[in-house]
């Protein structure tokens, strides 16, 4: 499947915090695919919170590019992913943010999978309350992330409370 580039007119909306009081969340690619490609019922509570506007879903350009790349490799071809629908969901519900600057080495949470580091850095730099993932390398950082105010969870363990 050939994945087109984003429209040139697509502007990056910078997140300036939570003046409206909604908590921020970062969702990794696999969980986004569970929602938008596989329509997995196990992510229903999470997706309802995102689509209702109860959460600020933070997305950096690299995250959007990653889902395009994964779909472009044909990973989910048998599910016939609808890229226009997926892009529309990002446009409607995601808050585009600038890529995160890596944390200082002394306090940085380092993921053993470098491809997943962007999710951790983004969540920490933008004060996300949750990072939702199924990736074992990301989930392994859950205990170390708690003192930073970040809960790293699977979608099944997530609640808005």
Image: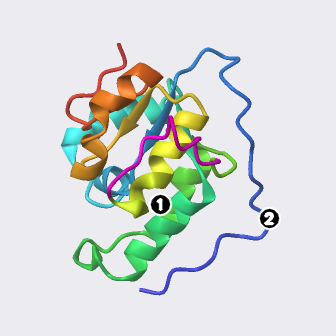
The correct choice, above or below, for 51 with respect to 84 in the image is above
Q: Dot 1 corresponds to which residue?
A: 86
Residue 17: name its quadrant.
Answer: top right
The quarter of the rendered structure image containing the C terminus is top left
Q: Is residue 104 visible?
A: yes
Mark 2 or mark 1: whose residue is earlier in sequence: 2
Q: Is residue 135 visible?
A: no
Is 64 on the left or on the right of 149, as rendered?
right
At 53% from the left and 28% from the top, the residue drawn is 53
Say which of 39 and 17 sits in front: 17
In this rendering, the count of numbered labels is 2
Say which of 4 and 134 sits in front: 134
Q: Dot 2 corresponds to which residue?
A: 9
Horizontal and vertical percent position of residue 63: 51, 58
Report the magenta stretch's main SS.
Answer: loop
Is 107 on the left or on the right of 78, as rendered?
right
Say which of 85 and 115 sits in front: 115
The correct choice, above or below, for 140 with respect to 19 in the image is below
At 42% from the left and 28% from the top, the residue drawn is 49
The correct choice, above or below, for 104 with respect to 157 in the image is below
Residue 76: name its quadrant.
Answer: bottom left
Horizontal and vertical percent position of residue 7: 71, 70
The range drawn in magenta is 101-112
Is 147 on the left or on the right of 21, as rendered?
left
Horizontal and vertical percent position of residue 101: 65, 48
Examine the structure image and report whether residue 87 is included in the region drawn in magenta. Answer: no
Residue 132: name its quadrant.
Answer: top left
At 71% from the left and 17% from the top, the residue drawn is 19
């Amino acid at each position: 499947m050939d994945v087109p580039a984003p429209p040139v007119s697509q502007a990056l909306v910078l997140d300036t915090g939570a003046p409206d009081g909604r908590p921020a969340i970062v969702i990794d690619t696999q969980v986004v695919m569970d929602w938008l490609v596989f329509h997995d019922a196990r992510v229903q509570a999470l997706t309802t919170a995102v689509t209702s506007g109860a959460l600020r879903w933070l997305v950096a350009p690299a995250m959007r590019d990653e889902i395009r790349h994964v779909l472009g490799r044909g990973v989910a071809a048998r599910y016939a992913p609808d890229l226009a629908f997926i892009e529309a969901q990002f446009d409607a519900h995601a808050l585009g943010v600038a890529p995160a600057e890596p944390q200082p080495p002394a306090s940085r949470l380092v993921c053993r999978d470098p491809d997943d580091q962007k999710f951790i850095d983004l969540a920490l730099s933008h004060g996300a309350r949750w990072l939702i993932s199924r990736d074992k390398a990301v989930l392994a950082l859950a205990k170390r992330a708690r003192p930073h105010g970040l809960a790293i969870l699977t979608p099944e363990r997530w609640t808005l409370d």
